[in-house]
Image (tube, rainbow, N blue to C red):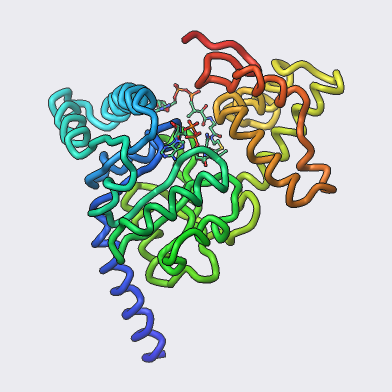
Amino acid sequence: MAFFNQLTRRSLSQSAAMSAAIKNVTVIGSGLMGAGIAQVAAQTGHTVTMVDIDGEAVKKAEKRIGDSIHRVAKKKFADGDEANKFISEALGRLSTSTDAVSSVTASDLVVEAIVENLDVKKKLFAQLDAAAPQHTIFASNTSSLPIGKIAEATNRKDRFGGLHFFNPVPVMKLLEVVRIPETSQATYDAMVAWGKTMGKVTVACKDTPGFIVNRLLVPYMFEAVRMVERGDASPRDVDTAMKLGAGYPMGPFELMDYVGLDTGKFIVDGWAKADPDNPLFKSSELVNKLVSEGKFGVKSGEGIYKYKK
Ligand SMILES: C[C@H](O)CC(=O)SCCNC(=O)CCNC(=O)[C@H](O)C(C)(C)COP(=O)(O)OP(=O)(O)OC[C@H]1O[C@@H](n2cnc3c(N)ncnc32)[C@H](O)[C@@H]1OP(=O)(O)O
Ligand SMILES: NC(=O)c1ccc[n+]([C@@H]2O[C@H](COP(=O)([O-])OP(=O)(O)OC[C@H]3O[C@@H](n4cnc5c(N)ncnc54)[C@H](O)[C@@H]3O)[C@@H](O)[C@H]2O)c1
């Protein structure tokens, strides 16, 4: 027992040391997820660099963060001066860049939230691995790709894991923390501790397709699409049914538009490649057509439904 306590104390103090070291965070990708992760990290006292290859995406993200942080502050503080102080301090800790490599040289943690494409993610991490300090932990926010495959691009598999946030990041409480067999205990503990400083509730996940939430949620959303494709119900009625009959905050079509139809398509296409006979991973003609027309959902102004720009 004493030995166990000693081990526990040692691993706790190791992880405390690592998590104490997570002060500087680099978030790569400033889309829906990257902007949210960068915002919450800045709100919780971290120095954050948010990076995107596309300067326009950075500008859009700054606008989205500005709107969102005002909603957060309004809810958090009754006093207007305190709310303004919270906003200006958080935004003061957030800088932006379009150069990923130079943005990681003083980073303790890199969270990648770029496009859901294995080759693109691997290419990015290979470049970052050469530039980041030894102690830097790398994490991917991938929805569906194997963390182990992404980590293969680096020489730091022991300092690599998955940190899977949910959209909208400032509101959704969950963080899935994913470890691969090579992830060290100190890295895993540091990721969990950091998740808590971000105000999230963490769950432990293995590196399996979709981790916990998406393995259940994505087949559900595509089953709803197949129902509509068969002509059994309209998207509006399916959404109404699931909100009022199952208590979900959004119906499956509203949620697909919110997540991004392109992201949904990347996820099922990737899983179908790995497991072509699984009927749950069948692609959808309707989703393929909308994505080919650039109708990605809320972020592009149209998907299953139309949105005001
Ligand atoms: C695919 C990926 O890998 C994984 C995923 O991310 S899957 C997707 C997971 N996400 C979901 O399932 C989202 C489901 N939807 C919801 O929970 C809710 O519809 C929602 C939180 C998005 C919006 O809630 P809703 O009540 O319809 O709207 P709204 O009244 O505008 O917002 C509710 C509260 O959230 C806050 N909020 C909503 N969006 C916000 C944002 N972007 N930033 C800050 N605050 C926000 C509002 O301030 C509001 O707070 P209040 O009730 O205390 O005033
Ligand atoms: N949308 C969701 O609900 C959701 C939820 C959890 C996880 N994810 C995952 O998070 C990641 C990002 O998703 P998103 O919805 O924010 O996508 P998004 O399309 O909104 O944003 C992706 C951003 O990455 C940028 N980018 C692409 N390649 C880059 C590179 N090499 N370097 C720097 N920036 C680059 C793009 O310019 C774009 O701004 C994906 O892996 C996705 O599967 C998405």
Q: Residue at x 13, y 25 (%)?
A: 81
Q: Quadrant of residue 171?
A: top left
- Residue 305 located left or right of residue 108: right
Q: Residue at x 32, y 35 (%)?
A: 98
| Percent of width and height locating residue 275 | 77, 51
Given residues 290 and 223, the one toward you in this image is 290
Q: Residue furthest top?
A: 308
Q: Residue at x 24, y 47 (%)?
A: 46
Given residues 40 and 265, the one toward you in this image is 265
- Residue 152 located left or right of residue 289: left
- Residue 5 located left or right of residue 240: left
User: Is residue 114 in view?
Assistant: yes
Q: How many marks?
A: 0
Q: Quadrant of residue 208?
A: bottom right
Q: Is residue 259 above or below residue 9?
A: above
Given residues 219 and 196, the one toward you in this image is 219
Q: Is residue 116 above or below residue 208?
A: above
| Percent of width and height locating residue 222 | 73, 33
Q: Quadrant of residue 305?
A: top right
Q: Quadrant of the N terminus?
A: bottom left
| Percent of width and height locating residue 170 | 38, 35
Q: Is residue 140 above or below residue 99?
A: below
- Residue 300 located left or right of residue 303: left
| Percent of width and height locating residue 241 | 71, 23
Q: Residue at x 66, y 47 (%)?
A: 215
User: Is residue 71 in view?
Assistant: no
Q: Is residue 220 above or below residue 103?
A: above
